[in-house]
Image (cartoon, helix red, strand yellow):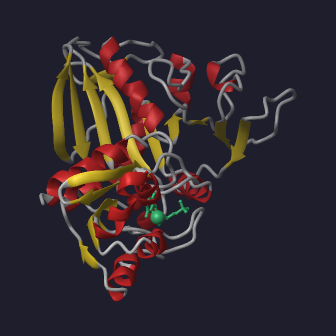
Amino acid sequence: MNYENYIQRCFDLARLGVSNVAPNPMVGAVLVYEDRIIGEGWHQKHGEAHAEVNAVNSVSPADRHLIEKSTLFVSLEPCNIFGKTPPCTDLILRHKIRKVVISCLDQTPEVSGRGVELLRKAGVDVITGILQEKGEALTNIRHTFVSKKRPYILLKFAQSKDGYMGRDGQQIWISNAFSKRIAHRLRSQLSAILVGTNTALTDNPRLDTRHWFGRSPLRIVIDRERKVPDTHFLMDGSQKTWVITEDATQPENCPPNLHFIRMKFDENLHGQLLARLFDEKITSLLVEGGAATLQSFIDIGLWDEAVIFTGNKMLGEGIEAPKISGTVTEEYPVAGDVLTIVKNTSNSR
Ligand code: AOF
Ligand code: ZN
């Protein structure tokens, strides 16, 4: 039996939950009897059944007697705790499944190895670490959140071929329509999206997912002095929005999902914001600009990944794109643009 193929299938299934499972991780599971898949499942929505439950429930009546003779493959260690749902270890024992193969451990402190231990103590043969690096990449958002107690931070920007992001006070479109769709897909997969005051004023962004589908993230704008006028899209109440400011007085007729949140604009502004996001169980944050806001996260090492679109135009002058150093993990063409993914491999905070 090729463990890697089945674990890879778990990853593919897991990804189907991409926009709907936060703050939970994406998880996939398959049940295999003598090299035949008899059940498959994935975690589809936060608060609902885990992958293992869906895999067991998907087995046809004709195959149900095979469950106890099957091997359960899961992309993540099965949970042993009562969260929103009962422990998956109970399910495994109740169905007398004797072999479980997993990719990586669940770093949630209450689980973290205990799920495996519980199963082994009950006599289940548990194999761990299959395609572990890929399994960890799949759960990086959740694992950053539980281990660093802050959201996974992804920086996104577009730059011209000669390294400029735009010109002061002027909206300039650098990347192409294909890149824009990829950017909107990214938005649909993350939980919150942040811009600074200048970007909000100059670009009047909507920060939604209109060129993709699925839910739109929480919008956050840093606006110390409340410069963004209420005629701008960010203030329209179409999506939940936080305005981070020094003056949090609610305006009259304020839309119910527009929140003015007071913070101290000192050297710990990022810390305050990230702590607030952690409290609200927001597991990922997309920082979209502008240059100064992006650079402020880079300067203090608070970033995990950067997605950079490089267009094929030259601007000659303007606002320089942030300088980022990390490990390039992917680079590919997008209809004339180049998309580069950089990971922060230094030990970020
Ligand atoms: C699994 N299988 O498919 C998922 C798991 O709040 P709950 O009930 O959804 O459970 C939270 C815990 O379950 C937490 O440890 C999280 O990492 C894990 N997610 N575990 O066995 C799954 N989604
Ligand atoms: Zn579970």
Find residue 147 and report its image quarter: bottom left
Quarter of the image for the C terminus: give it: bottom left
Q: Residue at x 44, y 37 (%)?
A: 189
- The residue positioned farthest toward the left in the image shown: 2
Q: Which of these two is toward me, 187 or 167?
A: 187
Q: Residue at x 34, y 77 (%)?
A: 116
Using residue 130 as the reference point, say whether residue 65 is left or right of it: right
- The residue positioned farthest toward the bottom in the image shown: 121
Q: Which of these two is toward me, 191 or 84?
A: 84
Where residue 238 appears, x then y in whole percent? 67, 24
Quarter of the image for the N terminus: give it: bottom left
Where residue 168 appears, x then y in whole percent? 43, 18
Using residue 136 as the reference point, say whether residue 250 is left or right of it: right
Where residue 142 appears, x then y in whole percent? 42, 57
Find residue 163 and report its image quarter: top left
Find residue 337 and report its image quarter: top left
Above or below residue 70? Residue 291 is: above
Q: Residue at x 56, y 53 (%)?
A: 48
Where residue 41 appears, x then y in whole percent? 40, 50
- The residue positioned farthest toward the right in the image shown: 252
Give the total number of marks visible in the rendering. 0
Residue 145 in view here: yes
Residue 174 in view here: no
Using residue 90 as the reference point, say whether residue 68 is left or right of it: left
Above or below residue 265? Residue 346 is: below
Q: Which of these two is toward me, 80 or 52?
A: 52
Using residue 193 as the reference point, say whether residue 34 is left or right of it: left
